[in-house]
Image (cartoon, grey):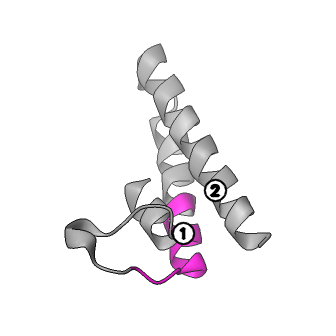
Amino acid sequence: ATQALMQLGQLPAPGGQKVEIDLPGAKQVIDILGMLEKKTSGNLDPEEAKLFQDILHGVRLSFLQATSK
């Protein structure tokens, strides 16, 4: 999720480096997170599953906001 947010320009890179917005890269990371959510379905305790869903929802929303600018 951190990688996706950096690629969307919402978090600075380590060391304060400038990060260029990379929408295709962010989408790829978000898609991988979605795949991991499906693969781990039923194997996480409820708190972990909720955290995963919340994080994924947040990065998807950030992606939609970045693409609507």
Would you identify the image quadrant in which residue 67 lies? Answer: bottom right
> 10 Å neighbourhood of mark 1: few (<14), some, or many (≥20)?
many
Above-or-below relation of 15 to 11:
below
Residue beneath the point at 63% across and 42% down: 57
Q: Amino acid at mark 2?
A: Ser
Q: Nearer the viewer, residue 13 or 34?
A: 13
Which portion, as a residue range, is magenta? 19-30
Residue 22, given in percent of the width and then of the height, sits at: 53, 81
Residue at image mark 1: 8
Marks 1 and 2 close (CB-CB < 8 Å)? yes
Q: Amino acid at mark 1?
A: Leu
User: Farthest residue in the right direction?
Assistant: 68
User: Farthest residue in the left direction?
Assistant: 15
Above-or-below relation of 56 to 22:
above
Does residue 12 appear anywhere in the picture?
A: yes
Secondary structure under the numbered disc 2 in the rendered image: helix
Would you identify the image quadrant in which residue 6 lies? Answer: bottom left
Residue at image mark 2: 62
